[in-house]
Amino acid sequence: MFFGPSTGYEYLTITDNASPQENILVYSTTSGTLIGSMPFLISGTNSGNEDAAIAVGNSVYYPSTYGYQYPASAESGTSIPASAPFVGGMQRVDVLSDGSGLTMRWQSQAIVSAGEPRLSLADNLIYTIGLDTTTGTYSLITVDPATGGLVSSTPYGSAAGDNPLQMVSMISPSGVLYQGTERGLLRVEALVPEPSTLARALTGAPNLRTTFTKIITRAEHTPWPRLFQNLRASCATDWVERYPALVVAKWLGHSPMIAATHYLQTRERHFEDVVTGEGKAAAQTLPGAAPASVHICVQSKAAATSSDSHDYRQRGRKHVIVRNDANRCGPKETAVVGGEGLEPPTPSV
């Protein structure tokens, strides 16, 4: 496997097939000299590999296939030893920045890879098929290449036909992963990015909006217009329903007036709560809800009669919500209000 930090062809890596301890070898493609040798995993336990390595930049990643059980029809010849349990494992080795030797970054005995792993540079995750050797369950797993830690695991089957037979997967430009198995082909697509994936992708990115938009598009969702402003607005609205407006404004770094003018939103369920009379109960049962000491009331244009419907249009939405139950909250006329209005005249007004 060729790899390198500049052209991608500065180095060549192989394993030496030694027994009982294999070694990871890295050569310079310019001079042909051995840059370094690193023992691979644990001798006599999982020090064996027949898959291609992942190699990118200055790093190589080798999974263990020692003891992997193939179908009888796929086996030929003898092996040494004749049999061994499959326990998996993976190891990362880096070439030193000056090219003078190797250093081991991590070993993981928890990664039991039944397929040939692939590294996605788009989200910086290693994808492979994991095997639970106790239950026989196969799962799509993702691994953090920086630490070797397991990021996610999604089971898909435990039958003999679900065996990926150490075959390599393919990741399409749209982010769909295809994995062959003994009886067919798997198509795997993420519904949403893993939170840790999103955090890693955004950390240090030169343009957060561009990077975030690409992640949303790969998940086959449509990015919002004014993405970060709308995220801020929805967050502010969520918080202000639980905590005092002054506190929320301080967290977000602006005044309550700015929040009310530019960020706080009205939602459909607010109308439903008023109509059904459940608003007060909902506020009382909300965890951490602040006392409703201040209410700002906004009245829409009145309907011609109490039985007419109101046309509630939400800016930024493509549909119109028409309520036909405005008569349920119509006023009851119990007295005639005089020309002076509700308040009596005072000398100071």
Image: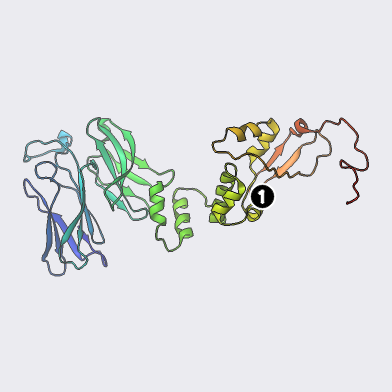
Residue 209, compared with residue 62, is above or below; it is: below
Residue 290, compared with residue 1, is above or below; it is: above
Residue 138 in view in this figure: yes
Q: Position of residue 43 (x, y in %)?
A: 9, 45
Which residue is more in the foreground, 155 or 76?
A: 155
Q: Amino acid at mark 1?
A: Arg
Quadrant location, the N terminus: bottom left
Q: Residue at x 83, y 30 (%)?
A: 332
Left or right of 204: which side holds 295? Answer: right
Which residue is more in the foreground, 206 or 26?
A: 206
Q: Residue at x 73, y 43 (%)?
A: 297
Q: Quadrant of residue 201?
A: bottom left
Left or right of 33: which side holds 299? Answer: right
Give the class, few, some or many, for how many residues have Cα within 10 Å of label 1's Cα (few <14, many ≥20): few
Question: Which residue corresponds to mark 1?
Answer: 315
Q: Position of residue 105 (x, y in %)?
A: 21, 54
Q: Residue at x 30, y 38 (%)?
A: 139
